[in-house]
Amino acid sequence: MIAYPCDSGSFSANYDVKWSGLKRPKAGCAFEKVSIVGGMFVTGGISCILGKKDKAVHIRNRDDYTMRLKWISKKFVVLYDVADKRAWLVDGASALLHLVRASLKRDSTDIFSAQFLYKESSLVEAPPEFNGKRASVFVLTHQSNMSLPLYAKPAATRHETNVGQLGAHSSVTTHTRTYYCLKDRIESIYEVLEQIIAHQADVASEDGVGFRVKHTLRQQLEGFDFMDIATDEDPLWPRTTSLQPRGRGWVDFIRAIHAITLFGTGFGEIIQPTRAENDPSCGKCNYNVNVPKMADYLTVCISDMREILQKQGTQTTNPWRLVDNIYWHAPDPPFDPCRCDSTLISSAPSPDRVQVLLPATFPRFWRRGMCSPNDLSLPHYGAVLFGYSPRFPLRWGGLGDPEVSPLVDGIENLDPSFADNMLGTSIGSLSTPVEHSTSTSSSTSTGAMEMSSTSDDSNEETARKRSKIFKDWMKGK
Amino acid sequence: MVEILTWFDSLRYHQAGVSAVVPSCIVNTSENQDVLISPKSEVQLGPPEGSDSKKEGQCWLGLFDTPMLLRGFPMLFRDEEWSGIEIPLDMLPMLVNSRKISKFGGKILIKGFAAALVPTKKAGNYIAWHVVVNSTGGHLSYTDSEIQSCLGSYPRDLVIGDLLSARHIVGWSNNVRSNAGESPRKELRYI
């Protein structure tokens, strides 16, 4: 992955996002008992404003709008496309802007569109040299953007009659019109995100989502529907999906950084390469191409990875530690130019740019010669993909450490919903994961998907066995 | 009219920290029946006796930087146990720089960026709120330990509809002193 500018804050992504269609979490899920309520505005007869001298230190001399954006820009959000099976890790400010844009798009086409005053052309966009978080913050904080009217509030009419000294009457009628502006929309969506983030990071109490999520199965990805938030659904109910086995390698990482997940359909290219006409691209080694679909890759901008490394990890170890016990291994240099043409001649395998995350408790962790990318400062606007790497194949169960063992395409990467229907049980609802099973019986509901071998050398044989089990099982059906 | 002008006059006083004003004025009538009003309010410098934002019932002091208390202002009678400051519902979100009343984990609270108001008691027509402030001015989370600890005494039967009709007292705490046995006064009470 190289030269992937982060487009999450710019206007080239798709804002006509559709609902995910996912179900609510079942019993035992981390978000099981959570719902988000928008809150209530209190408008009474009193109109007052706090005097400057009255404001306490915590609210004086400071614009809370900016402070809120600063706070959320340090948080992380996973946008998961349920149709494309692609995940994007973006900063909170970019996710907020993305939601705001999607909400405006929806407003321009719904049945109240006649009252909708916003014109897309009036939004001041970030200069082209701004990327990712910087571009998002520019748009969200631009003064003229914040005051863009979306809807008119009912006009207030004031009629005054003055009686002069000689008894002469004069009357003045004033109309005051106020608007619901873009800043109000931004704050509304911010408030919802703040609540979800608070739940996700709640590790202190046993009922907290952050605490519970550590004990839920890895394949169980929980969050909220992107469009529910964009269209101001109230209350908001959580959603959940099951990740295919090849998409579980980054789950521990997003849980460790308390990233919230928003589901949708048709996010488009949130992060995509911007390359000149003559720039080479190669789908074989994922060089300068759009993020492949159906592979459950997590795409992250280098700038965000740098921030996580700087604040929560360290580059003094080899491989680098990203957060907690999670290390970053690059099976091949991710930013090297494509050499697939030359490798064809030498019949060597194409380099694998997909990055791997794994814990230090992994067997022989420090003796495998693992390493992180050479230099993270060179591809300033690049992005990396995390996920299943054929060069360093890891099999992740629902809980515990992974094992080195290749996954068999077409069998183990079945669409979990398809598997759900076939197997007559929900993978997400299993209270005890079936993992590291060596049983050859097909009576175990998830056996065909979860079996693993204990030896690196018997991979091929295991794959053949697994294929046979699956075929037999299908015939039996 | 004179009384109203005197109350207004007391608003011009401004002292650092917590202080109090006892509004007063001198009314002189001249020979030609002109009335001359001279304000003569007494300013009590420094916090009035017993005021401390850490003290029970007075956490609301943390909401203001240099609050000026007006002594003698007529207010509705309130039971002694409801110590604190009475604030209309409309003004509560404003005090913590919030726009609305939120619900988190099924419980009502008002949360701004660095401060929050948490309901801690409901009885009769009163709802008591406790103020939680991040003194550094940094972000205060819904899951902040002090908020969660206050929610421990959250009135279980509280619904949004109660807020609209109730009187809101900011500053109540669990450790409020007991005034059992004191005879309630039925007239307007003066602080």
Image (cartoon, grey):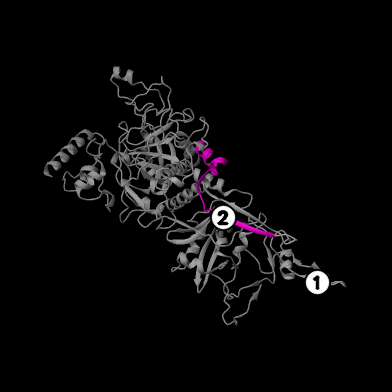
Give the foreground label among 2 and 1. 2
- Residue A314 in view in this figure: no
- Residue B80 in view in this figure: yes
Residue A160 magenta-highlighted: yes
Closer to us: A154 or B22: A154
Quarter assignment of residue A333:
top left
Q: Specify the amino acid type for callout 1.
A: Val
Lateral position of residue A434 relative to residue B38, left or right: left
**Mark 2 sits on what residue?**
A156
Q: Position of residue B170 (x, y in %)?
A: 57, 66
Q: Which mark is residue B27?
A: 1
Dot 1: few (<14), some (14–19), or many (≥20) neighbours within 10 Å?
few
Q: Residue at position x 53%, y 68% from top? A: B128
Label 2: element kind: strand
Residue farthest toward the right in the current orientation of the protein: B31
Closer to us: B34 or A306: B34
Looking at the rendering, the stretch of residues picked out in magenta corresponds to A134-162
Residue farthest toward the left in the current orientation of the protein: A476
Q: Quadrant of the C terminus of chain A?
A: top left
Q: Position of residue B178 (x, y in %)?
A: 57, 76
Q: Residue at position x 25%, y 41% from top? A: A415
Task: Determine the chain carrying the residue at label 1.
Answer: B
Q: Which mark is residue A253?
A: none
Closer to us: B37 or B191: B37
Q: Specify the amino acid type for callout 2.
A: Ala
Label 1: element kind: strand
Same subunit, tags 2 and 1:
no
